[in-house]
Image: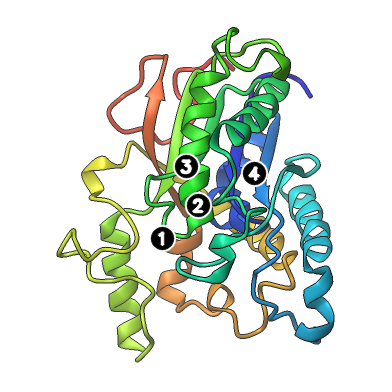
């Protein structure tokens, strides 16, 4: 794979589409190489695919989801799956959190070393993972943030993880997030239809379960031109996205806002950038 471009670090198959599908498509369309590292196999995900028998599919869900991931990445132009090799930890407070094979229980240094090897192999200009809350608090998302931030810095230091390949300094590092203005808009849009919102009221920072203050957002990327292909990639995750899926049944006024914009905190940029960017590659050549 040519060096440069975009590397996204995600917890489970399908996360790459939801949080970063648009920026992956934009980067690929501009000729930049793209890649995705997926930390777990998604073994504990729901099975809601049309015609799927959960009892029959559950024992082979990891294989099913890997095939779905491969197809989604093909549609996104993001290469072959790159798997960190850990087991899905499940939602917070569930038994999966205690599984020694889970990403949540992974030895931290081991997980960082695995991701450093992937970053050094890809040599990206931009790395993206999640905000500190992992977008919505899932243990694997939080762990992906922790491991991703440390690996994105450690990969530049030749004395760290020498077996993981030649050192590489990532020029720009971002964290996928959601601004509170969107969570408020989404909650109001759903309420008008009598539908529950997945977001708590962000008026009280202590109660917000998704997102950050708008002022923290360092990059807002318009990906409306990519929405059709982004949704096609999401549908490739057929076991997770059934006909009644929330993601496929958003109200019309929420649809474009939810899929047509992607937001990021700027963790670090080695190049000069404005306070607010509209492209993750701002300041980089090409």
Residue 243's image quarter? bottom right
Single out the mark in the foreground, 4 or 1.
Answer: 1
Q: Earlier in the sequence, mark 3 or mark 4?
A: 4
Residue 118's image quarter? top right
Left or right: residue 132 versus residue 223 is: left
- For image coordinates 78% across by 61% down, the residue present is 68
Question: CA separation, marks 2 and 3?
Answer: 6 Å
Single out the mark in the foreground, 3 or 4.
Answer: 3
Q: Cβ–Cβ below 8 Å for labels 2 and 4? A: no
Q: Earlier in the sequence, mark 1 or mark 2?
A: 1
Q: Earlier in the sequence, mark 1 or mark 3?
A: 1
Q: Which residue is mark 1?
A: 136
Q: Position of residue 96 (x, y in %)?
A: 59, 66
Residue 27's image quarter? top right
Quadrant of the snapshot with the N terminus? top right
**Dot 2, crowdedness within 10 Å: few (<14), some or many (≥20)?**
many
Label of residue 25 in the image = 4
Question: CA separation, marks 1 and 3?
Answer: 12 Å
Q: Earlier in the sequence, mark 2 or mark 4?
A: 4
Asked if residue 253 shows in the view, the reply is: yes
Q: Which residue is mark 3?
A: 145
* Residue 106 in the image: above or below residue 153: below
Q: Which residue is mark 2?
A: 141
Q: Position of residue 169 (x, y in %)?
A: 55, 14
Q: Cβ–Cβ below 8 Å for labels 1 and 2? A: yes
């Amino acid at each position: 794979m040519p060096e440069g471009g975009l590397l996204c670090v995600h917890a489970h198959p399908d996360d790459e589409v939801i949080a970063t599908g648009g920026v992956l498509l934009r980067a690929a369309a501009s000729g930049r190489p793209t890649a995705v590292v997926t930390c777990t196999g998604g073994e504990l995900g729901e099975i809601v695919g049309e015609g799927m028998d959960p009892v029959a599919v559950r024992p082979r869900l990891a294989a099913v989801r890997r095939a779905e991931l491969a197809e989604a990445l093909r549609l996104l132009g993001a290469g072959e799956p790159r798997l960190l090799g850990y087991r899905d930890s499940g939602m917070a407070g569930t038994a999966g959190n205690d599984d020694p094979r889970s990403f949540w229980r992974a030895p931290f240094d081991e997980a960082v070393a695995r991701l450093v090897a992937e970053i050094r192999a890809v040599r990206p200009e931009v790395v993206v993972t999640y905000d500190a809350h992992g977008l919505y608090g899932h243990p694997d998302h939080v762990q992906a943030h922790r491991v991703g931030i440390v690996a994105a810095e450690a990969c530049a230091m030749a004395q760290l993880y020498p077996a993981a390949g030649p050192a590489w300094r990532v020029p720009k590092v971002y964290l996928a997030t959601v601004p509170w203005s969107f969570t408020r808009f989404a909650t109001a849009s759903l309420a008008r239809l009598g539908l529950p919102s997945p977001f708590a009221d962000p008026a009280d920072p202590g109660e917000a379960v998704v997102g950050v203050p708008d002022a923290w957002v360092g990059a807002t990327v318009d990906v409306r031109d990519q929405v059709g292909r982004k949704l096609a990639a999401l549908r490739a995750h057929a076991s997770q996205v059934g006909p009644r899926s929330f993601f496929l049944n958003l109200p019309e006024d929420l649809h474009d806002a939810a899929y047509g914009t992607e937001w990021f905190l700027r963790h670090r940029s080695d190049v000069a950038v404005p306070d607010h960017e509209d492209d993750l590659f701002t300041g980089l050549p090409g």
